[in-house]
Amino acid sequence: MEFLYEYGLFLAKTVTFVIAVIAIVAVATASAIKNKHKKGELDITDLSEQFEEVEQEIVHALLNKEELKHKEKNDKKLAKEQAKADKAAAKKRGTSGSEDMTETQSKVFVLDFKGSIDAKEVSSLREEISAILSVATKNDEVFVRLESGGGMVHGYGLASSQLDRIRQHEIPLTVAVDKVAASGGYMMACVANNIIAAPFAILGSIGVIAQLPNFNKLLKKNDIDFEQFTAGEFKRTVTMFGENTEKGKEKFIEELEETHVLFKDFVNEHRPGLRLRKSGNG
């Protein structure tokens, strides 16, 4: 019996030690991964190759051997003809074929932006745009697939300024909206040269909102005092726990109106054809 007790105690100690080691290794690994991601990384996919691979798979599934052989022969013929045409065009311009291809072939850079309330994704967007601007020319295009219900003013203001960097480099910018680009999302979309939207996608509104609960009555009911001290009359206009004054609420609404005016001016600058009197009321 004593042997079983000693064995059980030894086993418990061993299991505890193993679990502790596994926990330490897991924490160290998670920390290393976290630090690695802090540096940021870009995943780049050649969409042209991806689409070509899909097309080839479908063609191979639909055509029989004879039809497939005939298509491959035609494809090779067309490729040779295109190469000759490119070479002739290069010769006419007084350049080599490889240089001509580099100069004239335009590229489309596709970005995805699915924005949260605080627009934290803007940090990745900034890095992506910086990478594109290091290689893109005016002959290229940037295509952004955007989805966002809006959020914090400063976050989406920064996101919009990142897209504006593309416009400042005179690179055509297109934003596609499949589902929603509301409020701050539309602030981003309006920067583009062109906006493409699905038939039932939601664009807008051009408005500003702020809301917060107030627990002052609940605190009073339970005999709890809330005290707040500020330097400056409007350091805090409204609060969740104190009793909000009419003067404070008026000042807060005034600040919202000022932000709304800035929003409308921003939209008007980038989309002068939009009837803001009708669509800029939130």
Image (tube, helix red, strand yellow):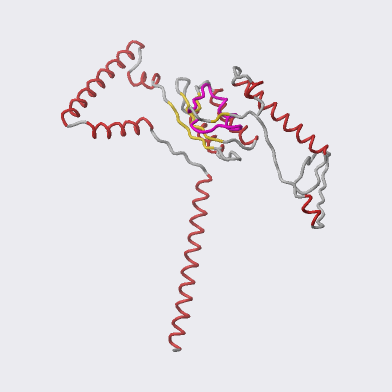
The residue at 64%/37% (across/down) is 152
Q: Indicate the quadrant containing the C terminus: top left, top right, bottom left or bottom right.
A: top right
The residue at 78%/40% (across/down) is 237
Which stretch is magenta? Answer: 177-198
The residue at 23%/32% (across/down) is 62
Above or below for 277 versus 218? above
Q: Indicate the quadrant containing the N terminus: top left, top right, bottom left or bottom right.
A: bottom left
Give the left or right position of residue 71, taking residue 171 as reference.
Answer: left
Give the left or right position of residue 183, taking residue 256 as reference.
Answer: left
The residue at 46%/72% (across/down) is 15
Residue 178 placement (x, y as % from top left) = 48, 31
Above or below for 29 versus 37? below
Above or below for 115 versus 268? below
Q: Residue furthest left?
A: 66
Give the left or right position of residue 51, taking residue 207 as reference.
Answer: left
Q: Which residue lies furthest to the bottom in this view?
A: 1
Q: Is residue 182 magenta?
A: yes
